[in-house]
Amino acid sequence: MSHNLNTRCLINHAIVQFPHYYQSMKKKIEPSFDAADALARLGANLRTARLRRAESESALASRLGVSRATIARLERGDGGVSLALAVEALLQYGFGDQLFTLADPDQDGVGKRLDALRRPSRGGAATPAHRIDPTKL
């Protein structure tokens, strides 16, 4: 029992002493094929926007407060780059209107139909949510 307690104490001490090391040990999520394709296309589109404006990676990096290497990773579609950075880059190049329509609830046809099916009809009971198959909508 004391062995487990000592081990936990040592681990807690290490985390307190070296928080930067443990924070950098985030679990890397491997994107699906479609997600990887979307990231690559987003990165390529951002690169095209930057090049059309005759802007260097370094200039964009400076404006966003990151390194040039991070911009290169973003443009390659690296899934480890912050979503906040991708959003900032999209806004820098005037893609705000497109950005703000992403995942718009009004465009979610399946979600709206599921929501309608869950609502009770006049005088009737709602269909239990676990019985609704979204693939048949």
Image: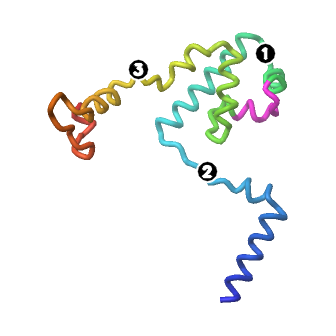
Tag 2 residue? 28
Main secondary structure along the magenta-highlighted residues: helix
Residue 103 shows which numbered tag? none
Residue 106 shows which numbered tag? 3
Q: Residue at x 51, y 23 (%)?
A: 102
The magenta stretch is: 64-73
State how far apart marks 2 and 1 are (Cα): 31 Å
Viewer-closest of 52 and 82: 82
Please indicate whether residue 124 sits to the left or right of residue 13 in the image. left
| Mark sitting earlier along the chain (2/1) | 2
Please indicate whether residue 68 sits to the left or right of residue 95 in the image. right
Q: Where the N terminus falls, by quadrant?
A: bottom right
Residue 55 shows which numbered tag? 1
| Mark sitting earlier along the chain (3/2) | 2
Whether 119 is drawn above or below 96: the answer is below
Q: Residues within 10 Å of mark 3 (few under 14, many from 20)?
A: few
Q: Position of residue 38 (x, y in %)?
A: 52, 30
Q: Residues within 10 Å of mark 2 (few under 14, many from 20)?
A: few
Please indicate whether residue 106 sits to the left or right of residue 61 in the image. left
| Mark sitting earlier along the chain (1/3) | 1
Q: Position of residue 67 (x, y in %)?
A: 82, 33
Q: Position of residue 112 (x, y in %)?
A: 33, 27
Instruction: Tell which tag, 2 or 1, sits nearer the viewer.
Output: 2
Contact? badges 3 and 2 (CB < 8 Å): no
Q: Where the C terminus falls, by quadrant?
A: top left
71 in the magenta segment? yes
Instruction: Tell which tag, 3 or 2, sits nearer the viewer.
Output: 3
Amino acid type, residue under disc 1 in the picture: Glu
Amino acid type, residue under disc 3 in the picture: Asp
Instruction: Tell which tag, 1 or 3, sits nearer the viewer.
Output: 3
Residue reaching furthest to the front:
123
Q: Residue at x 64, y 37 (%)?
A: 78
